[in-house]
Structure formats: structure tokens, C-alpha cells
Image (cartoon, rainbow, N blue to C red):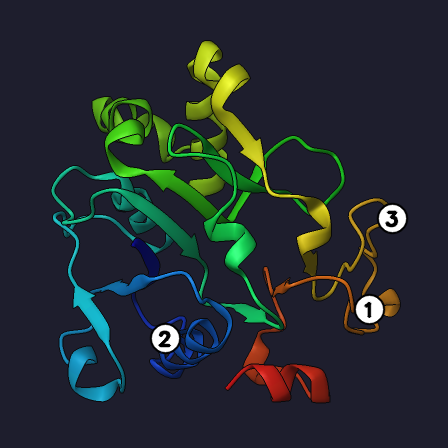
């Protein structure tokens, strides 16, 4: 049994994003799992349908994407193995490979899509709660204001992983690049940064499309998105 986790905070995403992610996971993940949504939405459990465990994070003074750091908080109610995905992903086929990737000692994460490999991309992550608490949460909590100077949670996670050089070398692994692709940039090797180059076609070999930045799934007019994001 693993925990599948997502985060809904503020007004950037509507509850339909949680519902559709739950629906996609139900169709595409056969590994036994519990579905968790951490949120500040007080009525979310009355809106959603399905076996969704709605929880609040232990701390209430963190803003936006920084709440993702609380996935590593020791008092969030998670234990064992966790698989996290951002709300703005589209699952196109079975994702058991993510749940089964490496072992419980490994922190798994997605490569960034800009091709420079400066940061990891925190859209998809897998970790063991007890293993990662001291490496990520304890170090982050020592001086949150320092980490807030960075651009976002994935920058902080990258730096925290690299800070523990031994763990980073032996226990951090990126999911195979062919499992994911960027909706707008498409290819990590030759990313299409210019908007005039965005064609939004489906990568037929990938399992997950990541909608980092804009546009978002609900804004897409592509049939392959509509057929899967539901």
C-alpha cells in the first residue's frame, strides 16, 4: 500500500483538478493505494466524489507552492511510501512504474524540462516519509526564510537533496525522462521555449504530460487532453 498525494491551496486551481486527478489515478494506477489531498479548502470533502482522504497540513502560515514542503512534515499523517503528482498533470496510461520505481531508501523525482539540469522538477516525486523527514523537512524548518528566497519549492528540494552529498549520490534517482513530457516545451533535449513553436501534440510514448506554467489542462482544446483529463 502506498499513499498517492496531491496539494490544493489557495485559488489557483479549482476542485475539479483534484477530482480529475483522482479519476485518472483510479484508471491508471493498479498498485494498492490511498488517495490524499492536502488543502486549505474547508468544504473540499463535501464537493469531491470517491475515496479521497482530505487533510489539512500541520502549519497554516505557508503560502502557495511552499505548502508542498509540508508533504515531508513529520505530523502530516503520512507514513511509508508516498507518490506525489501536481494537480496540473494529465495521465495517459498506466503509472504503476512510478509507484514501483527503485526502493524505499530512494528519493525519486522528475528531471526538469528546460534541458539544463540545474534543478529537479517537483511535479512528480516518490519518497519514504521516515527517510526524508530529516533530509528535507528538518533542514528546511531550521531557517524557512532562507529557503523562501529561492524561486520555488523545487529549487529548495533540489538544494536540500544536494546538501546531503552522500544521500544525493547514492539515493536520489530521477524517473526515466521518457515517462514524462512538457505539454508546451515537449522535448527535454530540444525544448520549444518560443510560444510560436508550441504545437501541443501528444508524446505517444510518455505516460504523463506535465502542464508547468501556462496553459493549464482546462484551457487545452486538444482531443488527447480532453479524453484523458476527466
Snapshot quadrant of residue 221: bottom right
> Is disc 2 in contact with disc 1, using a CB cutoff of under 8 Å?
no
Instruction: Inspect this view and state whether residue 152 appears.
Output: no
Question: Can you give x and y, in whole percent of width and height, for residue 180 in the image?
Answer: 66, 56
Question: From the viewer's perspective, is 140 left or right of 221?
Answer: left
Regarding mark 1 in the picture, which secondary structure is present there? loop
Q: Earlier in the sequence, mark 2 or mark 3?
A: 2
How many discs mark residues in the rendered view? 3
Circle 2 packing at 10 Å, graded few (<14), some (14-19), many (20+), is: many
Snapshot quadrant of residue 64: bottom left
> Is disc 3 in contact with disc 1, using a CB cutoff of under 8 Å?
no
Residue identifier under label 1: 198
In the foreground, 106 or 151:
106
Question: From the viewer's perspective, is 77 left or right of 100?
Answer: left
In the foreground, 88 or 4:
4
Residue identifier under label 2: 18
In the foreground, 22 or 1:
1
Q: Earlier in the sequence, mark 3 or mark 1?
A: 3
Residue identifier under label 3: 190
Q: Which residue extends farthest top?
A: 166
Amino acid at each position: 500500500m502506498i499513499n498517492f498525494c496531491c496539494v490544493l491551496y489557495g485559488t489557483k486551481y479549482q476542485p475539479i483538478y483534484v477530482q480529475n486527478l483522482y479519476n485518472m489515478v483510479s484508471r491508471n494506477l493498479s498498485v494498492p493505494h490511498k488517495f490524499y489531498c492536502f488543502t486549505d479548502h474547508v468544504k473540499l470533502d463535501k464537493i469531491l466524489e470517491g475515496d479521497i482522504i482530505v487533510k489539512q497540513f500541520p502549519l497554516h502560515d505557508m503560502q502557495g507552492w511552499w505548502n508542498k514542503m509540508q508533504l515531508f512534515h513529520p505530523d502530516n499523517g503520512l507514513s511509508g511510501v508516498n507518490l506525489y503528482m501536481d494537480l496540473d498533470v494529465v495521465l495517459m496510461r498506466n503509472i504503476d512504474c512510478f509507484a514501483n520505481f527503485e526502493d524505499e531508501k530512494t528519493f525519486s523525482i522528475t528531471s526538469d524540462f528546460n534541458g539544463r539540469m540545474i534543478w529537479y522538477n517537483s511535479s512528480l516525486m516518490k519518497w519514504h516519509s521516515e527517510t526524508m523527514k530529516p533530509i528535507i523537512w528538518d533542514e528546511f524548518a531550521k531557517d524557512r526564510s532562507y529557503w523562501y528566497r529561492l524561486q520555488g519549492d523545487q529549487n529548495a528540494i533540489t538544494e536540500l537533496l544536494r546538501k546531503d552529498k552522500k544521500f544525493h549520490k547514492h539515493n536520489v534517482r530521477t524517473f526515466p525522462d521518457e515517462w514524462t513530457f512538457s505539454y508546451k516545451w515537449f522535448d527535454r533535449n530540444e525544448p520549444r521555449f518560443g510560444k510560436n513553436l508550441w504545437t501541443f501534440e501528444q508524446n505517444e510514448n510518455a505516460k504523463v504530460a506535465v502542464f508547468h506554467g501556462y496553459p493549464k489542462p482546462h484551457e487545452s482544446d486538444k482531443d488527447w487532453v480532453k479524453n484523458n483529463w476527466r
